[in-house]
Each structure stands twice: as structure tokens, then as C-alpha cells.
Image: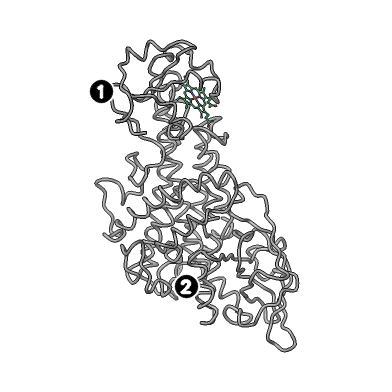
Amino acid sequence: MASKELKKFTREEVEQHNTEDSLWIIIDGRVFDVTRFRNLHPGGPTVFFDEGIPGGDATEAFFGLHRFDVLEKPQYQRLQIGVIDGEEPTIQGGILRGKVSQVPYAEPSWLADGYYSPYFKESHRKLHKAVREFVDNIVYPDAQERELDGKRPSQSVLDKMTEVELHAMRMGPGKHLKGRTLMGGIVKPEEFDYFHELIINQEIARCGARGYGDGLQAGCVIGLPPVLNFGSPELKARVVPEVLSAKKFICLAVSEAYAGSDVFGLQTTATKTEDGKHWIISGTKKWITNGTFADYFTVGCKTEDGFTVILVERGEGVNTKPIKTSYSSTAGTAYITFDKVKVPVENTLGEEGGGIFVMLSNFNHERWVMCCTSARSQRAITEECMKWVNQRKAFGKPLHSLAVVRSKLAGMIQRSESVQNWLENITYQMCNMSYKEQASKLAGPIAFLKSYSTQSAQLTAADAVQIFGGRGITQTGMGRFVEHYHRTVTFDALLGGAEDVLSDLGVRQAMRTMPKNTKL
Ligand code: HEM
């Protein structure tokens, strides 16, 4: 209800309603009748009789105990009966619905008032504005609900993303964008670059719903590139339009209970039929994101010639079941069995035995996307902490008056700034290098960045829990985003390669390019 249509009261009028029979309170200039609600209040009825609360201003008490969005829920909005005459609500909170946060370090510096960037141009700023509004109004509400009920991201949201070509843009720059109207025409397909894509990845990450984030077409982001880059023209013509319009879903099925990053240890086999026209695929796959609802599976198989990637369609012999992980089943994480599945040889992606090349070419982009997400998620947690230390009082003073708390915040800010700045530098290299140059020059730096970024993220998650105390381990209420982040942050540290594996890869790549004649 808009405050204009509400009745106006003086503070003196509200003061009269201070008994069990008529109990009103003021929160941020709004008047609430909690007479009947108090017995349904999750925090119990007694709190409404704390000193100064009945008929009084409960703003400070309220915001010390509740998130802003409590007041936005329809069931609680109904409790508002009016406003205080001559006063306007001043407190801002919850999702910003398209706006840029004014909290220091809550946004990357290119978005903060009065700061500059050599990387982000007019078209990036326009795209950012449109994507933020889209995410805040359409994706965020669905993310909060689905993360809780564990259902797939709603088809209505996926369809709206199709209308503005968000699925296609999440595949990065390339030929697949040709002829598409991106975000209502804000960016031309030929000018779309990795900074545009970075913006999309980072805006989606702001939803703070990790399982949903993966449920929202992560399978497409990592499973479709092998089809786009290595599929036959006929296969592409059939599969790509269906997937980029979210009519069908795809996932990348490589890891197994037997082997993860070690693709040569995989045990899923593909053998040719006698006439050579089909593959027969048997084996199992584990931890496959979007697997429970995928129609297509980009599968890593052991073949006579080594390792081959093949596109399998859901059908006879394909079985998927959900795996319970520490984040929501909205991600569709699956255990998959392939039982003598017959697949046309035309579904082979790349050369037979050349699967490692297909996989390696996928890794850089996949890991870079994860860096975008990790950088933005840790920044969002830093913002949660900045707000909390500002509003929460301990020993009569705000939390930020404690040096130990400020020291933790300093670490969070320094880490999220360094991750973002390194990410922007790598993104700039990607924009200027050919695909081949990226493959040879950026595998190491991207591996380092991902490893560094998830180590930073885990430190930030642990410190955030310390700052929020018990609320940081509680799934509802003030610390719910911190609890969720702390519970799910390890996904980032594992997917796309564990931290130690990636750091080691970075050093090995560097040693390979050491000049032979260098001495101390
Ligand atoms: C319109 C007014 C209010 C509404 C709609 C409301 C609603 C709620 C809700 C939904 C929760 C559960 C939060 C969660 O865990 O998700 C809650 C908890 C609580 N509320 Fe309120 N509340 C109101 C006013 C107040 C006031 C004025 C006080 C104190 C004077 C208060 C004290 C508490 C306490 C102590 C809790 C438990 C907090 C916790 O578990 O950390 N509430 N309230």
C-alpha cells in the first residue's frame, strides 16, 4: 500500500494504543497495529511490552532484530494502518530494485559514484542498468523462493531471460549472438565482449542463492560450448536453438565417483556398433549440475582411441536421480547412469580420442565465469557485514567501534577489491587475445585467480560468521545470507578444479615458459 493512501496519525495518538486490547507501534514513520499479530509473532508476544515499545517508536529495536524485507512481505504489510503525519520513511534496505548501493565497497569501483574505469564503456553501463533491473525484479524473487523449496528455476523466469537473450549472452561473445536482439537492442551482437558477460555473471550472483545460481542454466554455460565449438552443423542447428531458448536443457557430464579432474581415469565407456553408425555408452556420472532435468548430456567417455566427448539425449537407458548436497536441489545435482545407451556417431563432439582438447578449451571460460561469481558474492557478503556492524549495537556501541571487527572488515574489503581488479585485468586480456592466445597464455592466470578468489571467499565467509555471531549459523533472519554463503562457499572452491590443483597448474604453466638461459 502506498503511504499516501494511508491514514495519518500524530505520535500522541499512537501513544494512546499501549495496551493488550489495542497495541500499536511505530517503525520508520509507519504505524502498525500488532494487537492480534503479537500472539502470532515469531519472536513471541512479550517483546511488544518491552520498555518504550507499546504505543512508541520501535524502529531501533526492530532493525536490530529483523531484515528490512520482513516489512515488505504481504502478510506483514497488512499490519500497517497508517503513517506519522509529516514524517516520511527514511530507511532503505533489502533488494535495491535496480539501484546502485551507496554502502562503501558494496559495488565494484567502476559503479561507485565519482570513480573511473578504463574498461567499462557506455554500452557496459547501459547493459548493467538493464540487467540489474531485470535481476532484481524478475530473478531475485524466484531465487529466494526456489532456493527454499528446491524446485527448478521457474520456467516463466527462463522464458523472460530468453526474450532478452540472456541465455545466449551467457555463452560469451561469438557467432551464436549474430542476428539476436540483446537486452532489447542495448548492445549490438558484434560489440558484445567479455565485460558485458562479466556484468551478467556478477548481477546474477547478487541474488545470494548459490543452488539457484547453478540451477539457472549453469549446465548450459559449461555443457553447450562443446556443442557450439565442436558439434556438426546439423547437430548445432537442432540443439543450440532449443537450449538457448530454454525449451530444452543441457549439462556437462564428466566427473564420476571414480574420477573427477583426472579425465583419463574415467570409466564410462563408449564402444562402436559393428556397422560403425552408433556408440553404445555405459557407465555412471556423479555431481552433474542440472542433470536431474537435463534433456542433453555432454558426456566424457573412454573410447578405443582414448577420451571422447559425445552428446547424449535423454531416452532409453538414461537415468538421473538427485544427489543431496549442502546447497539446494534447485541446482539439479544428479547421479546419472547410462545403461547401453545407443547414440548416433554424428553426436561426437570433436575428434574421436580428442576429448581432452574439447575439455581443455572449455575450462578457461568456465573458471573465469566462476571468478566473476565468486568476486561478486564475496563483495555482497562484505556489504551484509558493513550494514550489520553499522546497525548492531554491543555494549552500547555500534559493532564497528570494536577494532577487531574493523580489522575483519579491512580483510574482506581488501580481498574483494583485489579479486575484482585482477578479474578485470584478465577480462581485458580475454577481450584482446585470439582464442588460441587465450588458451596458451591465460590458463595459468585464470587458474591462479580462481584459486585465490575462492580462498579469499572462504576467509570472508568465516569472518562474516564471526561478525554475525549466532545469526551467521541461522537459516532465517538477519544472518540468512551469511549462513547460506558460509554453507555453500566450498562449491566455488571445488567446481572447475580444486584450489591446490589450480594453483599447481598456474605454477607448472609458468615454469614451462621460463627462459632456458635465465640464471640468478
Ligand atoms: C510489524 C512489526 C513486526 C513484525 C512484522 C515482526 C516479524 C518478525 C518475524 C517475521 C520474525 C522472524 C524473523 C526470522 O527469523 O526470519 C521476528 C522475530 C523476532 N522479532 Fe519481530 N516483528 C515485529 C516487531 C518486533 C518488535 C517491535 C520487536 C522487539 C521489540 C520484535 C522482536 C523480535 C524478536 C526478539 C525476534 C526473534 C529474533 C531472532 O530469532 O533473532 N519484533 N519478528
**Percent x, y for residue 274?**
75, 87
Report helix, strand or loop for mark 2.
Answer: helix
Tell me residue 286's x, y (percent): 68, 60
User: Gap in Å between the C-alphas at discs 1 and 2?
Assistant: 65 Å
The answer to whether residue 434 is above or below residue 94 is below
Circle 1 crowding by C-alpha within 10 Å: few under 14, some 14–19, many from 20 = few
Residues 25 and 397: in front is 25
- Relative placement, left or right, of 114 versus 13 is left
Report the front residue among 133 and 376.
133
Residue 388 vs 230, above or below: the answer is: above
Task: Give the quadrant of residue 100.
Answer: top left
In the rendered image, the vertical position of residue 208 relative to residue 68, given as above or below: below
Q: Where is residue 442 in the image (x, y as percent from the top left)?
A: 45, 67
Q: Which residue is drawn at 71% across and 64% down?
A: 319
Residue shown at the point (48%, 18%) measured from the top left: 35
Q: Is mark 1 on a helix, strand or loop?
A: loop
Q: Is residue 316 left or right of residue 368?
A: right
Q: In this view, does 81 lie to the left or right of 119?
A: right
Using the rendered view, name the quadrant where residue 508 is placed. bottom right
Q: Which of marks 1 and 2 is nearer the N terminus?
A: 1
- Which label is found at residue 86? 1
Looking at numbered disc 1 in the image, what kind of residue is underneath it?
A: Gly
Quadrant of the image for the N terminus?
Answer: top left
Mark 2: which amino acid?
Ser
Q: Position of residue 28 (x, y in %)?
A: 35, 25
Q: What residue would you read off at disc 2?
A: 440
Q: Is mark 1 within 8 Å of ligand 1?
A: no
The answer to whether the residues at label 1 and label 2 have Cβ atoms under 8 Å apart is no
